[in-house]
Amino acid sequence: MRAFDVFVNGKKICRAGIAGYSVLTTIVSSLIVDPESPTGKAMGDEYPEPFLDLQIGGLDVRTNQHLHWPRLDLKVGDEVTVKIVEADDGIDEPTEYVMPKEISQQTED
């Protein structure tokens, strides 16, 4: 199966992979909202603090189950490396499994 070996600053975070038909993602996000911008003003006092993070996840298309591996806070200067590999073993267990019903309940709360 196709898998991602994910490293931060040379330290292996995980090997993420899903057998069969699937979607696999590694996302580095940076969010900075200017409170004086139209978006910031529309959010009022609810705009989030700036952040940098790394999210590793995927979707098992057969079951429609979302899988998540560790989510990490990052800082400026961190180096994130993703090595794409074929691996039949050594896949790290996801830290979270979410079924579609659970997802819809989370968005309703």
Image (tube, rainbow, N blue to C red):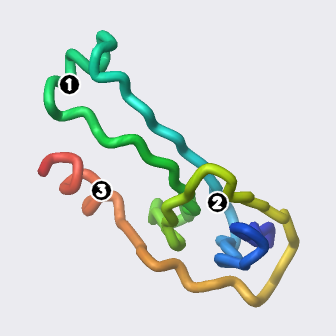
Location of residue 39 (image quadrant) = top left
Q: Please tell me which residue lies in front, 84 or 37.
A: 37
Mark-to-mark CA distance, 3 and 2: 18 Å
Secondary-structure class at tag 2:
strand
Nearer-N-terminus badge (3/1) = 1
**Residue 32 position within the rendered picture, expressed as x and y whole percent measured from the top left:** 43, 33
Is residue 37 visible from the viewing direction of this image?
Answer: yes
- Position above or below: 43 against 17: above
Mark-to-mark CA distance, 3 and 1: 24 Å
Is residue 6 visible from the viewing direction of this image?
Answer: no
Q: Please tell me which residue lies in front, 1 or 91.
A: 91
Nearer-N-terminus badge (1/2) = 2
- Kindly identify the amino acid type of the residue bearing the numbered disc 3: Ile
Disc number for residue 17: none
Mark-to-mark CA distance, 1 and 2: 35 Å
The structure residue drawn at horizontal position 78% and vertical position 73%, both measured from the top left corner, is: 10
Q: Which residue is mark 1?
A: 43
- Kindly identify the amino acid type of the residue bearing the numbered disc 2: Ser
**Residue 46 position within the rendered picture, expressed as x and y whole percent measured from the top left:** 18, 34
Label 3: how many Cα within 10 Å (few below 14, some 14–19, many 20+): few
Label 2: how many Cα within 10 Å (few below 14, some 14–19, many 20+): some
**Residue 72 position within the rendered picture, expressed as x and y whole percent measured from the top left:** 51, 65
Secondary-structure class at tag 1:
helix
Q: Which residue is mark 2?
A: 22
- Kindly identify the amino acid type of the residue bearing the numbered disc 1: Met
Q: Which residue is mark 3?
A: 103
